[in-house]
Amino acid sequence: MAADIKSHVLRRDEKGFAGIPFKRLLLGGVSGGMTLIIARFAVGNLAFLLAALTCILALMLTGSRGGLPLWQRLLYRLRGTLTLAAARKPKSLSGRLGNTLDMPTGLVVLDAEAVFAPPEGEVEADMTEWVTFARADEADHDSGLVFVEQALEGVSHG
């Protein structure tokens, strides 16, 4: 005998602390700990401050807004900036960097005929060829459009 579990929950709230999910807290703690271990060799007691900053930075960069974490939004912004610079100002430093990284400059120019083209295969209906009747009793069923006036007297909208 099996029981079907039905859930209408689209997004589950994750447990954590101060509104930060546990997975992000764990990532921040592990990245801060690894920074502490490695930085102790190079900077000594200053490594604690560096580890705390790494933990906070990891928490900030993994914060999601609109479904994308901050690090990914920043990466998309950098990519878009380099693409625009390569298309608009190819002689500038960022334009040359965009060309070196082979940014797709063809995406910068939008073709209105391609963007706003109607879907193929769609048939346009000519509404002037429809037969219309003033009263419903004049028309056969399935023979055309019928305009019917509705009397609102005595109709309650409860």
Image (cartoon, helix red, strand yellow):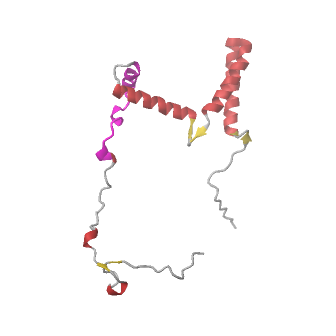
Up/down of 2 relative to 120, above or below: below
Q: Quarter of the image containing the C terminus?
A: bottom right
Observer able to see residue 86: yes
- Residue 49 appears at what percent x and percent y? 71, 19
- Residue 74 appears at what percent x and percent y? 52, 31
Up/down of 134 relative to 48, above or below: below
Up/down of 50 relative to 137, above or below: above
Q: Quadrant of residue 71?
A: top right
Q: Work out whether residue 102 or residue 87 is closer to the camera in this orientation and state it.
A: 87
Observer able to see residue 31: no
Q: Residue furthest front?
A: 153
Q: Quarter of the image containing the N terminus?
A: bottom right
Up/down of 74 relative to 5, above or below: above
Image point 36% across, 35% down: which residue? 108
- Residue 76 appears at what percent x and percent y? 48, 33
Image point 67% across, 28% down: which residue? 56
Total labels: the figure holds 0
Q: Quadrant of residue 96?
A: top left
- Residue 157 appears at what percent x and percent y? 57, 75
Left or right: 38 as drawn, with respect to 79: right
Q: Work out whether residue 75 or residue 90 is closer to the camera in this orientation and state it.
A: 90
Image point 63% across, 51% down: which residue? 11
- The rendered magenta stretch, by its main secondary structure, is classed as helix
Left or right: 25 as drawn, with respect to 157: right
**107 in magenta:** yes
Q: Residue furthest bottom?
A: 137
Image point 54% across, 80% down: which residue? 155
- Residue bounds of the magenta highlight: 93-114
Q: Quadrant of residue 24?
A: top right
